[in-house]
Amino acid sequence: MNKEFVISTDLGGTKILSALINKENKIIERSKLATDSNKGPDFIVECIAKSVKSLLKKTGIDQKEVRALSLGVPGTVNPESGIISIAPNLNIKNYNIKKALQKYFEIPVLLENDVNLGGLGVKYFEYKNKVKNMLVVFVGTGIGGALIFNGKLYRGSSFFAGEIGHMKVNFDGSLNAGDSKETFESLASRTAIVNSIVVKSKKNDTVLKKTIKKGERIKSKTLSKAITEKDKLVIEEMTKGCKIIGTVLGSLTTLLNFDTIVLGGGAIEANEEFMMTRIKKAFFEAVIEPAGKIAKVTATKLGDDAAIYGGIALADEFLPNE
């Protein structure tokens, strides 16, 4: 039986997104399932299995027709051993998720960090391998990065490469942090921006006051609406976040000489025009001119599908002859 399909799964703290992709690289079916990270890794594995089985049942595809199940995890993972070293948002530590999930399927299970998987999707399916040295950054609840060097994903010596959200930075985005306890994502993620808005809303007017008072979650689209309504506080805090993002990415490009920097994630997707204009300005002010001259800074068009498509590239890497 020909193995013409790949199943790609993006694992989050509250939901699991799975997709079945055919040999023409078309998504033919999707499955979205809620999960609860507080119930432990075995429960999460059960939810993943349920999501995948739902896809197979909907489409009538036999497991033997699927060449790989590629799983993206928000944490530090070893694609070779299948072990999650740590995934804070999932409350998982030192857990072999590959082994646990493999018990449910004949399909080979492959594992990768979720942002790395998104980076692979962007490289192979948006840029069609036309980039050599690329940095992919997703801005949302946190900030994560994927590094592509000489056309290949760089995972690092202990599979921790790309965790740019944890870099120590100053409030202006400079990397000379000194004794600062602030990190890139604690200053410039959507979570950080929202937290700052909530604190400052006690002394400043904002259209979000009712939302804040009710304790409702402020999403990226909520920020976009506030910007449209010319909310001064939201615009100021979003602008500050963009300056930090652009400054950090400019400094990294001075060091690593990327030809392409691609941004994605919920915050960018919902506020692309506003954020990208300001990020680019800060980027080109921070980067050294010879490196900045060749650097292209842009937003991905793949959205949530970046990690889904990355599952195909992961299968090609680890199961090239399947």
Image (cartoon, rainbow, N blue to C red):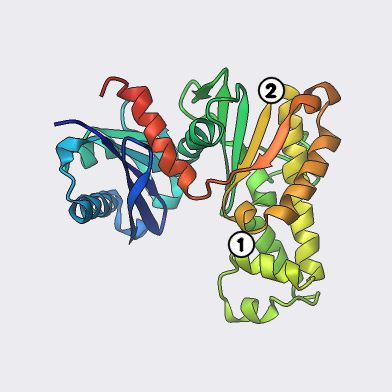
Q: Which residue is mark 1?
A: 220
Q: Secondary structure at mark 1?
A: helix
Is residue 199 in sight in this rendering?
A: no
Dot 1: within a 10 Å radius of its alpha carbon, few (fewer than 14), some, or many (20 or more) residues? many
Q: Disc 2 marks which amino acid? A: Leu
In this picture, residue 60 sits left or right of residue 15: left
Q: Nearer the viewer, residue 274 or 163?
A: 274
**Residue at horizontal 20%, vertical 38%?**
102
Q: Is residue 45 above or below residue 122?
A: below
N-terminal of the pair, mark 2 or mark 1, is 1
In this picture, residue 30 sits left or right of residue 176: left
Q: Which residue is mark 2?
A: 256
In this picture, residue 57 sits left or right of residue 264: left
**Residue at horizontal 75%, vertical 56%?**
274
Name the quarter where the N terminus is drawn: top left
Report the residue that reaches farthest toward the top: 150
Q: Nearer the viewer, residue 275 or 92?
A: 275
Q: Nearer the viewer, residue 279 or 174?
A: 279
In the drawing, what numbered circle is on residue 183? none
**Residue at horizontal 38%, vertical 58%?**
15
Q: Disc 1 marks which amino acid? A: Ser
**Residue at horizontal 70%, vertical 50%?**
187
Locate residue 146, reporting x and y percent.
Answer: 55, 33
